[in-house]
Amino acid sequence: MSEQEFREYAAHLAFEPPAGERVEWWLSQILAVLVNTNRAKGKEPVKPADLIPDRWALPESRAEKLKKFKNQLIGLAAFGGKAK
């Protein structure tokens, strides 16, 4: 692949998402229609964006893990020993 071809491909991807992301968006729209037509009265409609998996979520930071662990320890001490 030449540099020119690479630049053209990079420019194309900047405007058009890869096929996998487009498929996830199309499927989320179909699922939203199915869910919303069969939902109970009074419930809020589901948005298609809520049905797309978050594949690029950042992993928990060390500080978040330590905070959860500390809360578990506090829970163990406060409630007699076993975490729920």
Image (spheres, rainbow, N blue to C red):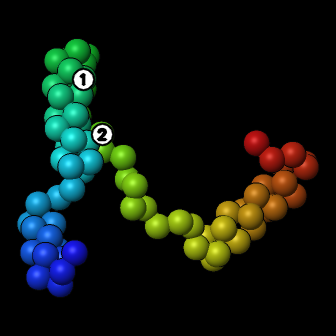
In the depicted structure, whether residue 82 falls above or below residue 27: below
Residue at image x 56%, y 67%?
Answer: 60
- State the image quarter where residue 14 is shown: bottom left
- The quadrant of the picture occupied by the C terminus is top right
Q: Position of residue 55 (x, y in %)?
A: 40, 55
| Relative horizontal placement of residue 66, taking residue 16 as reference (left or right) | right
- Residue 40 in view of the camera: yes
User: Mark 2 = which residue?
Assistant: 51
User: Mark 1 = which residue?
Assistant: 35
Query: Does the CB distance between marks 1 and 2 fall below 8 Å?
Result: yes
Q: Position of residue 57 (x, y in %)?
A: 43, 62
Residue at image x 36%, y 46%?
Answer: 53
Identified by mark 2, the residue type is Leu
- State the image quarter where residue 68 is shown: bottom right
Which of the numbered marks, if any, corresponds to residue 17?
none
In the depicted structure, whether residue 74 falls above or below residue 10: above
Q: Nearer the viewer, residue 25 or 2?
A: 2
| Relative horizontal placement of residue 84, taking residue 14 as reference (left or right) | right
- Residue 47 in view of the camera: no
Q: Nearer the viewer, residue 9 or 57?
A: 9
Residue at image x 21%, y 56%?
Answer: 18
- The quadrant of the picture occupied by the N terminus is bottom left
In the depicted structure, whether residue 73 falls above or below residue 25: below
Residue at image x 91%, y 49%?
Answer: 81
